[in-house]
Image: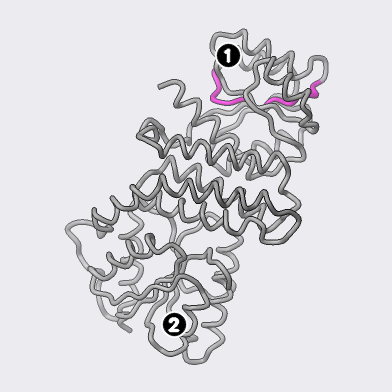
Amino acid sequence: MNPSRILFVANDPLFATCYGEALAKAGFHVNVALDGESALPRIQEGQVDLVVIDLLLPGIQSSQVIAAIRENKSTRSLPIIALPTELEPLAQAAHEAGVTKRLERFANPVATLINAVESFKEGSPAVARTEPAQASKEWLKQCAVELPTRIVRLRRALQNTRQQTGQSGLFGELLQEVHQLCELSILIGRKPIFQLASALESLVFDLDTLPQQATLSTVRTVGQAIDLLDTLLGGDRWTRLKILNESQILVVDDDANARQLITAAMQLVTLSATSAATPEATLSIVKRAPFDLIFLDIGLPGMNGFELCTKIRALPAHRDTPIVFLTGMATFQNRVQSSLSGGNDFIGKPFNIPELGVKALLWAFKGQLASV
């Protein structure tokens, strides 16, 4: 088989064009479909040798597109390459539907895709390249110019969400916008932007599939993440950031299950966490080592979180450490008290795991900016 005709299925025209141009330069004929509805007729008419598909599409889900291809006798053996995703439910659904190959995230996503397409050429060794294939500088520049304007679209989508309530798929528009920001940021190598946007994508995906998770706390965290992305993309501030994979997080809660859950949430966004169950243990830990962020429960035995926060703020090493309160009652009084005691933010219980990851990343990144 020699897959000369490729159908690239992705909802973002700019993203699809960047990849399409690179594939064309590598000798392939590329067409683009912006959704599953327009992709399936072309595939079923036999106009395609290989499909490259984004796993997050509007309308017909990508797994449904893949399943439809596999159910048709004439397209059953058609190679289907799935673009990378951090959303495991989508990846699992694509696998079960019959995707041929799922790509992983690599330093050069364009080269990774072209190598994957070329691997389907029968009897043809991999092409030896003096330099890895990549999108043209013109298109990468266009993507960089486009990124700040995506914030406007994110804000509009969030506003549309706030004007509606109680319906399935409420966050679909916002999810598409965050996803496209993720893909463009990794395409042009802005890894800190991708790290935050990817965590935000997981949170919004959660809210879209489980509307009951859309609380005041989670929606507020989404807005905070968009605000920080706006700050980072409005100039060159993102260049001051480093990927957060060595940041140290302290989790203070007398509930063992809560500590375990928050620690697991940190691991999902590649952060390391230390935990403490009592105020005494917490003070002993913070006197020995600095932390990049502290999650602090309000209802602790012997000394409440507000009092403990005041004591932590008295330590020179933690005068400016971001502190996020954990509370089951996000009342106005608690918000005021959290600010007066030196806290930076709060997050509501019961916890949403992706929200914990977004909250940690945005405050750890803010801490980086403040220290530069």
Q: Which of the two discs, 2 and 1, sits closer to the camera?
A: 2
Identify residue for label 1: 288
Amino acid residing under circle 1: Arg
Outermost residue toward the right in this view: 302
Q: Position of residue 16 (x, y in %)?
A: 38, 64
Give the residue at mark 2: 78
Q: Find residue 177 and report its horizontal and vertical position in percent.
A: 51, 54
Asked if residue 294 lies in the magenta stretch, the reply is yes
* Figure quadrant of residue 80: bottom left
Residue 105 occupies which quadrant of the picture? bottom left
Give the image location of residue 52, x and y in percent.
42, 71
| SS state under label 2 | loop
- Mark sitting on residue 257: none
Amino acid type, residue under disc 2 in the picture: Leu
Q: Quadrant of residue 325?
A: top right
Q: Tell whether position 188 is magenta.
A: no
